[in-house]
Amino acid sequence: MIRLNLIEAAGRVNASGASAAVIELGTPAVSGKKKNRALSIVVAALIIIVCCCAYLMLIDVPKPLEGKIPPVILSVLGVEDPASSGLSMNRTSAQKTSAGGSIEKQRAEVAEEVARAGMSPERIVTEIRPEALMAPPKKDDYASFLPMEKIAYQKALSAQMLTFINTVTPSDINFSDIVYSAPDFYYMHAEAGNPSSQKSYLDRLRAASTEFRTPPIPENAPATEITAYGRLSAKPQMPAAPAPLVKEAEVAAELGALHGLEATHKLRLAGWDRPAVEDRGVYRLFTYKVSTNADFPAVQAFVDALQKSPVRIGIEKLEMHAAAKGMTSQFTFTMYVAR
């Protein structure tokens, strides 16, 4: 049937004298397939290139390819060829870090920096000791002290303050007020025998103080009057370890030991029966405000004995005032009691 149709079509061509156009139906399909195949090859090549670049950036240059990849390509990717950098590394045993490098590589870089700084690794290890890194920070601020550290500081500073005043004060200085307040504040009001003694005494106080002040003297005040306040610059030697908090059952014993110091130095303090108690969570703060009519030498001896004793009671404040007969002193004692 097909043969007959072809013969008939050929006859029509010969009869008309013109040739009919031949339409090739299979050519566009074959061309499309070739284009799709070429596009697939290009995409596959791009995927392979991207994977290779990612491998080099994340995993580093494989050992079989060391020294064979052009340096220009590696520099664009930010990858270093171990063969060109002189690093000899066992890829199978090198430990990888989360950043993609190796511990051996980082150690080599640290060693290079150390050598460049002119310091040997032995010196660095000697200077940076683990125990120094783990040591607790040094506390110089009274507000950051632990409760029993504050007690030790109060005892030491109050004794140091009275010793300092007794040492630098000449015989022609007559006090009317001396005040000490923890941690190291002082105030004093006195009168000197002459202007020269007044100036000399103020110079001594200024040399041993920080934040030293001398407020203006009133017009009707004597020319030799002394009013000064500041902070004692010298700090006491603190114990290596603070004493433990006083237990509830030990309160009476601590007070008894303090009363023993009173009797030894012929000092009678009144007002122990009315303490103020402040609850601070894990401990309570006992505050005793007591007074005595003892003279300055007796008070100084008592405070010095308290500082040297193991009694866990501090002096938060001491006020000494001139009286009609002698002087009066008011102590503010503090004791921290565990709950």
Image (cartoon, rainbow, N blue to C red):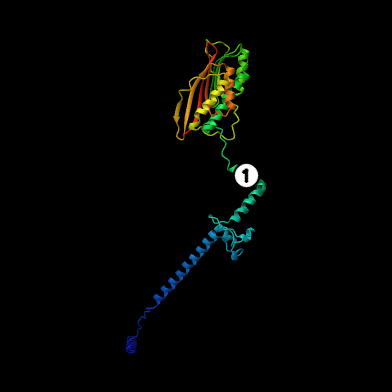
Q: Tell me the SS state at disc 1.
A: loop
Q: Is residue 121 above or below residue 88?
A: above
Q: Is residue 105 visible?
A: yes
Is 175 displayed left or right of 30 in the figure?
right
Picture coordinates of residue 330 (x, y %)? Answer: 51, 19
Give the residue drawn at x 56%, y 20%: 263
Is 189 displayed left or right of 29 in the figure?
right
Q: Can residue 120 be seen in this view?
A: no
Q: Label 1 neighbourhood size at 10 Å, few (<14), some (14-19), many (20+)?
A: few
Give the residue drawn at x 59%, y 55%: 103
Q: In this view, does 275 lie above or below 324?
A: below
Depth check, front residue: 104 or 253: 253
Picture coordinates of residue 190 (x, y %)? Answer: 56, 15
Give the residue drawn at x 47%, y 28%: 286
Quadrant in the picture for the N terminus: bottom left
Which image quadrant is residue 325 in? Answer: top right
Q: In this view, does 78 lie above or below 228?
A: below
Depth check, front residue: 89 or 299: 299
Depth check, front residue: 249 or 135: 249
Which residue type does callout 1 highlight? Arg
The residue pinned by badge 1 equals 129
Which image quadrant is residue 29 in? Answer: bottom left
Picture coordinates of residue 228 (x, y %)? Answer: 56, 19
Is 107 displayed left or right of 10 in the figure?
right
Picture coordinates of residue 141 (x, y %)? Answer: 54, 32
Q: Is residue 32 above or below residue 204?
A: below
